[in-house]
Amino acid sequence: CLVGSLNCLDWSLLTPATKEMLALAEKVTGRFQGDPSFEYSLSEINAEAAARLVESGKEPVMKEEARLIATIEQIDREVGIIPRGAFVKTPLGSVHENRHFEGLSLREAKKLSSYFHFTEPVNLKNKTLLEKADLDPSTDFLDSLEHDIPRGSWSIQLEKGGTVVVLRSLLWLGLTFYHVPTTKQFGYVYFGTGEKNLDLPFML
Amino acid sequence: ERGHGPYQPHEPGYGLDQPGYSPYEDEIPDPQTRMLAIKNAKAYLLKTSTKSGMNLYDHFANMLTKILDEQPTNTVDIIENISKDVKWAQFRKKMDTLRDEYLISPTFEAAEKCKALFVKEDGEEEQEELDEEMGEPPLPNVMETAFYFEQAGVGLNKDESYYIFLALKNLINIQPIQTCRFWGKILGLEMNYIIAEVQLREGEEEEEAGEEGEETVVEGEKEMGEAEEEDEQKEKAPEPPKSTYKPPPEIPKEANGTGTNKYVYFVCNEPGKPWVKLPPVTPAQIVCARKIKKFFTGRLDAPVVSFPPFPGNEANYLRAQIARISAGTQVSPTGFYQFANEDEEEEEADTYEENPEFEPPPVAEMVESLGSWAHHVKGILKQGRCVWVNPSQKSEENEEEEEEEEEEEEENQEERGPPLLTLISEDEGMKNIPAWTAQASTDLIPEYSVAILQSNRWPGAYAFASGRKFENIYFGWGHKYSPESHTPALPPPAQAEYPSGREITETVDPTVEEEMAFKAAQEEALAEAEEGEDDEGEDD
C-alpha cells in the first residue's frame, strides 16, 4: 500500500487505483500542479469519458490525487524492476523474497537480461520451447528487460568504479534502479515530473 | 649367525627370543648408545652424494610424501619407479610456463584513475605565485556550490563533487584559463558528461581561428579546380539542364568570445578522464538542434542520426544544447550585473560587469517575485545567433546572383531578441505552466534559507541565491520540456521540376463545332481580304 505526503511530516494512505482511474490518467498530460485537490477538466481532454461521467452522475473532472495514484501504479507496473534471483516462486505459486539472494555477479550485472519487471509477465508465454527449457521456473518467472520495446529504453551504467550498477529508464525519465553486485542491496526510486516520455522512439 | 631378510628362513618365534632382537629389549638401559646409533644413521642418510647433490634422507622423505599423497595401488611393486620419478622431478621446473594472469578488477583501475586526481604536482609552487598576480583564482568552489544546492535537494554526492573539484583544478593547470565554472552534468545512455564552462585567457584562442582559415582556403582552391574542369566539359558536350536550386546562404557563426560562443566548454565522461574541448557552435547547428530530440550516448564522436540531418556529430549536438540551455536558464539576481557602458543601446550590449553597489534582496523577496532574477546570457534568435546578421551581405561571388537574392532577402526581417539583462518574469510559460518555479529551501529556518529557482522549460536547470552568492547548474538529460509530443519535421515538398506557365499547361482540346466555326470565320476573313484587294485593284 502507498502512503503519500506533501511535507514528509503528515502522511496519508493512498487508495489503490481503479481501472477507470488508470485509463483516464493516461489521457491527462502536462505537469502535476502540487495540489492534491486540483481538478483536471476532462471535457477538454476526452469528451467521451466526460460524457460517461456526467451520465453516471459525477462531474467530468479528474482529481490530481487520482492522477497521482494512477501514475504511481503505472510507473511501478511498467518500469519497476528487480534483479534476477531476488524473488522466488514456490511450486504453490506464491512469490516471496529470496533469503539466500547474494546479488548478481559483476558480469551478470552488466547484462539487461539479469533484471526483471516486477509485475505479471506478459512475454513469458510467447517464448519458444527451446528458450523455456533453459529457464529455471523458480527464479525466471518474470519478463526480463531484454525484450522491452523499444530496444534500448534502458540505460545501464557502472558507477563508483564498478561497485554500483545503475539502470535508468528512458520511458519514465527519473526512474533510477541501483544494485551493488555480490550484495543483497538493490532498489529503485523515482524522482521526476510524473510524465511518460512518449518521444522515446524519436530520441534513440 | 643367521641373517634376516626375505630369503632367509624365519625361526619359530621369529627369533625374537635371541638376545638383541626381542621387542622388549628396546628398553634396555643405556639409551644413549641407541640415540648415538640413531644420530649416526641419520647423519649417514643425510650425506650428500658427490654425483647428484641429493641425499638419501631427503629422497626418502620426498618419496614417502609422494606415496602418501597419491596412495597408488600395489605401491611395493612400483616402488623403484616411484623412486625414479621422484629423482626426475628434481630436474623439472616447479613453475608451469602458463601462468594465471593477474586479473585487475575494474574497481582497481577506476581507483587508479581517481588516484591521479589526488596527486599534487611539483610545479604548483610556481603557479601559486602566478595566481597571486592574476587576482581572483579561476577555480570555482565546487563544494560550496554543492552545499547550497544540497539544500534544494539537487546535486551529486559528495564524493563525485570532490572528484569534479579536483578534475577542474587539473583543467586549470593544463589550459590557460581565466575564469572557470562547473556548468553541470548531462546524462547519456552509455556514459555521462561533466561540463565545465570556461573563459580562456586572451590571445589563446587565435590559434584556432588560424586553423579554420586554412581549412577554408584549401576548400576554396578545390572549388576553383572543379570549376575549371566544368568549363572544359562545357565546351565538349551540351550539358543537361542545371538545377536552379541554390541552398540558402550559410549564416556565419559568431566569433569566439561573443554571443553563443562567449564561453568555451570542456567535457569529460568521468572526473579523472582527460578533458575534451568542444568546438564552437554554428547557427545551423542550433537551428537544427531545435528541431530534433535525441539522447546523448556518451561518446563525443557518435553520429547524430536524425531528420533534418544534424550538421555534426554528438560533440556538436552537445555544444548546441549547452548553448541553448545557457541562453535559456542562466540567471542571476537582478542588479548583480549591470551594463558596462550605459550609453550603449541595451539591445546591442554584450558585456556586463558586476555592480559594486548591489544590495541583495532578502530571500523571501527572491522567492516571491520572479522580477528579482534576470538573465545574464543573451537569448538566441531564430536565426541561431545572438546578434542578427543579414545573410545576403556576405555573398561576394556573382553580381547577378546578388541582385536576384536581394529581392528575396528584403523579406528577411531583422530579428531582435530580448536585451541582455531581462527579468525572468517576462519569460513565457507553456500552456498554463509558468516558465520558472521558485521556492525557499526551508520554511523552518528562514534566516538561513536559500532561494531556489527551478526551470520548467528546461527541466534540470536550477539556480540558487543566498545573499551575494548565487550559482546556476544543470543536471539532466539535456532536452527542453514540451507539453506536446515531439513531432519530427516533415520532409520539404518535392521541388517543382519546371515552372508552370501558359505555354505548357494543358487545355481542353477544342470540340469539332468550335473548329468548324473557327475555320468558317477564317475563310470569311480571307474572302473579305480578297474582296478588299479586288476593290482596290479596280480603283486603279
Image: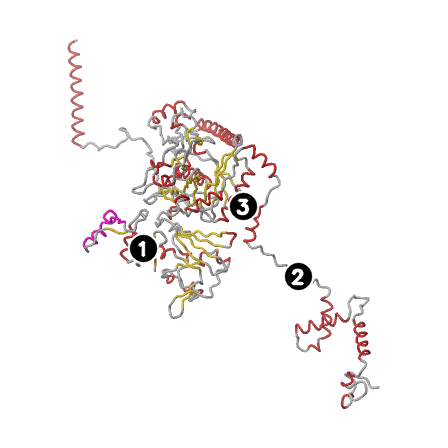
- Kind of residue sitting beneath label 3: Gly
Q: Which segment did they paint magenta?
A: A38-55
The answer to whether the residues at label 2 and label 1 have Cβ atoms under 8 Å apart is: no
Residue at left 69%, top 71%?
B66
Tag nearer the camera, 1 or 3: 1
Label 3 marks a residue whose chain is: B
Category of crowding for the residue at label 1, using alpha-carbon neighbours closer than 10 angstroms: few (below 14), some (14–19), many (at least 20): many
Q: Which residue is mark 2?
A: B96
Q: Nearer the viewer, residue B525 or B372?
A: B372
Query: In this image, B324 relative to B130: left or right?
Result: left
Residue B222, how many percent across, how many down? Answer: 49, 30
Left or right relative to B463: residue B101? right
Residue B272 marker: 3
| Chain assignment, label 1 | A
What's the residue type where badge 1 is placed?
Ile
- Prevailing SS of the magenta stretch: helix
Determine the CA span between mark 2 and mark 3: 39 Å
Residue that lies at the very extreme toward the bottom in this rendered image: B12
Q: Which residue is mark 1?
A: A69
